[in-house]
Amino acid sequence: MKRTNGTHAVNDDEWYTPRKTADRVADWLARSDGGNLAPDTSILCPADILPDGSESQIPAALRQRGFTDVRVTRDLPLNNMFCDYSFDANGGIGEVVVTNPPFSLLKPFRLWLRSNPRIRYCVLGRPCSLDGWPIVEMKDKFFTEDKPRKSVAAAWFQNMRDTRRMPVQTERAIGDCGDCESPCCPNNVHCRDWKPGQPRPLFGWCVAIQNGLGGHFCNKYIKDGKHKFARFFDKQ
């Protein structure tokens, strides 16, 4: 996977979305055990017009898979008043958002999604950037094709199907809320209903994605007097 800067003779999307990956995402969205989207579902691919004006691989893969109503724009929807988004599509549920967005805009995009809970999406996100569940088969990292090759932790998150593995592999946990030394839990949508001392297994990024988790996390876990990296958990 190469970085697109608008000067390559052959565009291969932004980082981390070559055609092979786009095809797998499109296939999952169409499958009955995946997104289960009908061919005429209205889909929006924002942030999918490349610097040279061409489209990314994602809308091309969706159309090839048989989706007939795929709209492509340059800008990610971040504000209801000014976004290029059809709230009336799909019988009033709104367009399904499918994209690999600029990672720098994931936080405001996440807030926009939370303010519009009916909107369905399938979006590539970094750890601690999106809610929902991962597409487990797409795994937890992507690699560049440049030399030396680099890996980036990221997963395709969606809110159309609960992909949690049951039972969760608690034996692979690397922490527990019951052992946290923080005096209080973070006041956010993930943790505000929890209290330190209540047991709950915590997982690293890779194991979380393998278990269909990753949409709920805590970045204030303290053990042995040290703040740990973000931990992910199953929120029933």
Image: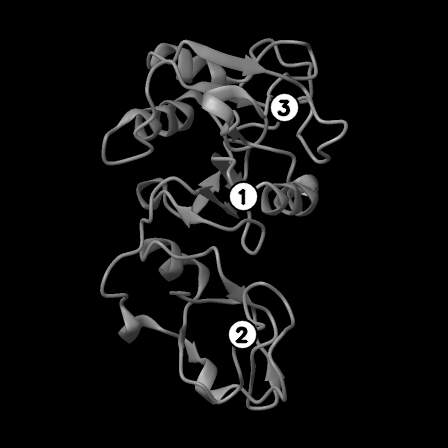
In the rendered view, would you say 190 is above or below 212? Answer: below
The answer to whether any part of residue 170 appears in the image is yes
Three-letter code for the amino acid on which mark 2 is drawn? Asp
Q: Residues within 10 Å of mark 3 (few under 14, many from 20)?
A: many
The label on residue 225 is none
**At x 52% / y 24%, what residue is drawn?**
95
Reading the image, the residue beneath label 3 is 85
Looking at the image, tell me whether mark 1 or mark 3 is earlier in sequence order: 3
Could you tell me how many numbered marks the image carries? 3
**At x 48% / y 89%, what residue is drawn?**
197
Q: Can you name the residue that lies furthest to the right here?
A: 82
Name the one closer to the observer, 19 or 180.
180
Looking at the image, tell me whether mark 2 or mark 1 is earlier in sequence order: 1
Under tag 2, what secondary structure? loop
Three-letter code for the amino acid on which mark 3 is drawn? Tyr
Q: Position of residue 125 (x, y in %)?
A: 54, 44
Q: CA distance from mark 3 to mark 2?
A: 33 Å
Under tag 1, what secondary structure? loop
**At x 56% / y 22%, what residue is drawn?**
88
Q: What colour-coding does the image apply?
A: one colour
Under tag 3, what secondary structure? loop
Q: CA distance from mark 1 to mark 3?
A: 14 Å
Reading the image, the residue beneath label 1 is 117
Reading the image, the residue beneath label 2 is 193
**At x 56% / y 27%, what residue is drawn?**
2
Q: Residues within 10 Å of mark 2 (few under 14, many from 20)?
A: few
Three-letter code for the amino acid on which mark 1 is drawn? Pro
Q: CA distance from mark 2 to mark 1?
A: 20 Å
